[in-house]
Image: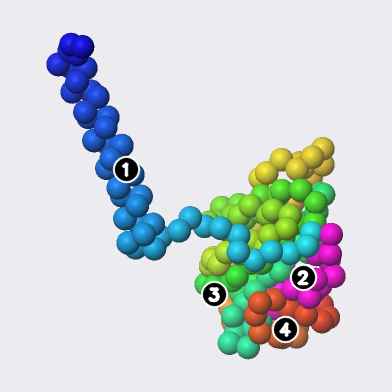
Amino acid sequence: MNVDLYERIWMWGTAGMLALFFGSTAVAAIGRQFQPPSHVETINPAAALSDPRFASRGVWVDDQGGVHVTVIGMMFVWLPDHVTVPAETPVTFHLTSTDVTHGYQIVRTNGQTMVIPGYVSRFTTRFAPGEYLIACNEYCGLGHHAMAGRLTVVPAAEWAGPGTAAPAAPAPEGGDHGSH
């Protein structure tokens, strides 16, 4: 079979690019041990409200002084729907859903994750002082448009704290830890 020169160039060029892409993926996965983000921590969605990691929702501080926020998403509300955290401080969010997939987006920040039933999503970020809208950016049903919350970020010197400290990670147990 006689293949035109230009067609052979395109075939070899495409094969070369595919080899480069697959090779770089293999080097990253095997050689550098890069892995795609995944949900490692699981939870029973039917029991999320009583699970010790989520039984107490809101802001809490661990033994090392790290600020955490524990949130449950359910049609069509975030529990809690308003939290207050200190500015310019790393804040770790722990989220899960009891029903369907939600998207937790803190508008005008880099704080965003998918909240999937059966899994615990987690991200850490910092905020400048101000008021931020928390929106569900994953369609979750007829009341999706009303699923919103609020994040208040105050200067660290003015932050009153969550009230009581929770036990060390992975998440709080016990009473209300300052759902502001």
Residue nearest the observer in this picture, 24 or 101 = 24
Q: How would you rate the neighbour count of disc 4 (Cα within 10 Å): few for under 14, some for 14-19, many for 20 or more?
A: many
Amino acid tagged 2: Phe
Amino acid tagged 1: Phe
Q: How would you rate the neighbour count of disc 2 (Cα within 10 Å): few for under 14, some for 14-19, many for 20 or more?
A: many
Residue 54, disc: 2
Q: Quadrant of the C terminus?
A: bottom right
State which mark lies toward you, 1 or 2: 1
Q: Is residue 45 left or right of residue 92?
A: right
Residue extending furthest toward the front: 1
Establish if 59 lies above or below 118. Answer: below
- The residue to which callout 4 is attached is 166
The location of residue 107, given as percent across then percent down, is 60, 52
Task: Decide which of tag 3 and tag 1 comes sooner along the chain.
Answer: 1
Task: Decide which of tag 1 and tag 4 comes sooner along the chain.
Answer: 1
Task: Decide which of tag 4 and tag 3 comes sooner along the chain.
Answer: 3
Q: Is residue 128 left or right of residue 22?
A: right
- The residue to which callout 1 is attached is 21
> Cα distance, mark 3 to mark 2?
22 Å
Say if mark 1 contacts mark 4, CB within 8 Å. no
- The residue to which callout 3 is attached is 89
